[in-house]
Image: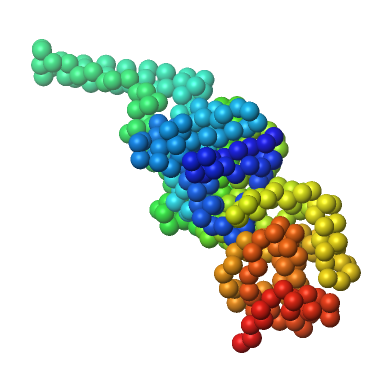
Amino acid sequence: MEMKIEYDDGSYINFMAYHKNFFMGGCNEKKWKLCRSFERLKSGKQLSIVEENVYGDDGLSFFMGEKRITAKDVDIHIVNSRESIFSALEYKKGSLMYAQMESFKMSFDVNRMLDQLNNELLKIESEVQGSFAGLSDNITPIFLPITFEGLLKNQLLFSYLEKGKIFPLEMMDVGELLDEFCQLLRLEIERSARENWLVLRNAESFIYGKHLQRFMDELEKISFETKLLKIFVISDSYVDFTYTQEDIEKTIILGDQDEQLPPFDVFRKSICNHYPSEFIWSDNQLVSSAFRVFHYLGNERLYPYINEKDMVLLKVVTGLLGMPTLECLVMEDGLNDLERAFLRDKLQKIFD
């Protein structure tokens, strides 16, 4: 379904939304404004007079098709730091952990055990009152019933374990808590049966190695199984996911003019038609190289070094999208004569 997100007054990013969506390209300012819009929608608050200078007096606009989306229509999760993961796992209002613990209020077994506990409490109360009778004719002690709310407020503590040792939450390896985050997210979606959006911002800066791919795999699994989760990946640099051919059309390049890429077969055909020599890359090579260079598109800054084959692909895609040319240091050892001539024609060479 087509989606429109306002990032400045009257300015929108338009794209075809999938269960997973990648926002790339060199316009980091627009990525920041996109995240700002997600965060503002999540708050659900009315715009202040000052905020109307950003979004206009008609408010912030999100559209799915013709339907305008408000905070009442969707639950939004912003994952942009270690702290955002930790916050979701703390017992505080609005967190995933809070929602999970609150859900136990409806548990038949929990309420049955509370009844048993309060029956025992009455016995204790009777015993204490009997002993107290010899002390006063005017005062008698009464124990208030134990409630689940009281247990959550006064008796609840969490232990955070890593390799069998207890750590303060803020000292945990965030990668060790991603499974718990995903499980809590799944349970919340299943309880609410509401549309959920997860915004993953610069995840490569705080989730490392195998943890990041495992996190994405689990989020995709939740999305496919519940049909209620959309994932928005917004990054200023390369993210080392295992990309597939289907991910090409889920990619939006943000620049002066935003461009959503076509399906893979159309993308590959366009590359073949504009490549300076016979294009003999495999599909997997093309996908991997494409996602390594997408974050450079539309950026005129100088970069120190890029793989020579990636550089050729970057210049081809830059030309196809009509975006500005950037200068890069590139080694030519791995290029054929036509590729080398293509780069020399397109670039002002820089030598060290």
Left of 185 or right of it: where is 284?
Answer: right
Residue at x-position 37% and y-position 20%:
118
Question: Which of the 4 quarters of the picture holds residue 131?
Answer: top left
Residue 222, x across and y down, in percent: 66, 39
Front-lying residue, 106 or 264: 264
Left of 132 or right of it: where is 320?
Answer: right
Question: Which of the 4 quarters of the picture holds residue 319?
Answer: bottom right
Counting labels gives: 0
The color scheme shown is: rainbow
Q: From the image, which quarter does the C terminus lie in? A: bottom right
Instruction: Please determine whether, in this image, residue 342 is positioned above or below residue 61.
Output: below
Residue at x-position 16% and y-position 19%:
132
Front-lying residue, 322 or 23: 322
Residue 217, x across and y down, in percent: 67, 48
Instruction: Please determine whether, in this image, residue 126 is positioned above or below residue 234.
Output: above
Residue 179, x across and y down, in percent: 58, 47
Residue at x-position 60% and y-position 55%:
255
Q: From the image, which quarter does the N terminus lie in? A: top right
Instruction: Please determine whether, in this image, residue 188 is positioned above or below residue 291.
Output: above
Which residue extends farthest bottom?
352
Residue at x-position 51% and y-position 30%:
70
Residue 168 in view (yes/no): yes
Residue 209 in view (yes/no): no
Residue 6, x across and y down, in percent: 54, 40
Front-lying residue, 196 or 125: 196
Left of 103 or right of it: where is 152?
Answer: left
